[in-house]
């Protein structure tokens, strides 16, 4: 059985967790999304390494990456419900 790191993508900002933009605005949502993207990238790297090493099939790797992509989209929708990019992107569903 394969062991995968389990994590929960945060959908709300802890107090004081902010990002300062070039225009001086602070946005905690950006840091949460950045963290979620880093987790996604790390998980995809692990899945790709397992597939390349012959530990899982290409089909299983695809299913796992697709599931993580859906988690990432769900986290983005929770953070930015008015963002139409997440609604318009129908590819991969």
Image (cartoon, rainbow, N blue to C red):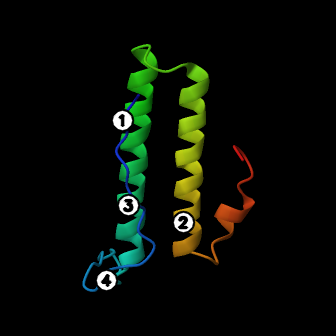
Residue marked by disc 4: 24
Residue marked by disc 3: 34
Q: Nearer the viewer, residue 61 or 40?
A: 61
Residue marked by disc 1: 3
Q: Earlier in the sequence, mark 3 or mark 4?
A: 4
**Which element is circle 4 on?**
loop
Q: Position of residue 83 (x, y in %)?
A: 63, 72
Q: Earlier in the sequence, mark 4 or mark 2?
A: 4
| Residue for point 53% across, 29% down | 61
The answer to whether the residue labelled 4 contacts the one labelled 2, judged by CB atoms less than 8 Å apart, is no
How packed mark 3 is, by other alpha carbons closer than 10 Å (few <14, some 14-19, many 20 or more), is few
Residue 73: image quadrant is: bottom right
Residue marked by disc 2: 76
Q: Nearer the viewer, residue 7 or 76?
A: 7
| Residue for point 41% across, 23% down | 50
Per the model, the C-alpha gap separating discs 3 and 4 is 18 Å
Q: Nearer the viewer, residue 89 or 13?
A: 13
How packed mark 2 is, by other alpha carbons closer than 10 Å (few <14, some 14-19, many 20 or more), is many
Per the model, the C-alpha gap separating discs 4 and 1 is 42 Å
Mark drawn on residue 17: none
Q: Earlier in the sequence, mark 2 or mark 1?
A: 1
Q: Earlier in the sequence, mark 3 or mark 2?
A: 3
Per the model, the C-alpha gap separating discs 2 and 1 is 26 Å
The answer to whether the residue labelled 4 contacts the one labelled 1, judged by CB atoms less than 8 Å apart, is no
Q: Position of residue 13 (x, y in %)?
A: 36, 79
**Which element is circle 2 on?**
helix
Location of residue 67 with respect to 12 vertically, above or below: above
Per the model, the C-alpha gap separating discs 3 and 2 is 10 Å
| Residue for point 41% across, 28% down | 1
The answer to whether the residue labelled 3 contacts the one labelled 1, judged by CB atoms less than 8 Å apart, is no
């Amino acid at each position: 059985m394969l062991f995968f790191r389990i994590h929960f993508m945060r959908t709300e900002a802890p107090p004081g967790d902010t990002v300062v933009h070039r225009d001086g605005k602070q946005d905690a949502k950006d840091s949460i999304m950045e963290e979620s993207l880093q987790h996604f990238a790390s998980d995809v790297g692990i899945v790709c390494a397992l597939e390349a090493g012959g530990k899982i099939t290409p089909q299983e790797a695809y299913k796992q990456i697709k599931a993580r992509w859906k988690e990432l989209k769900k986290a983005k929708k929770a953070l930015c419900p008015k963002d139409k990019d997440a609604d318009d992107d129908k590819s991969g569903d």
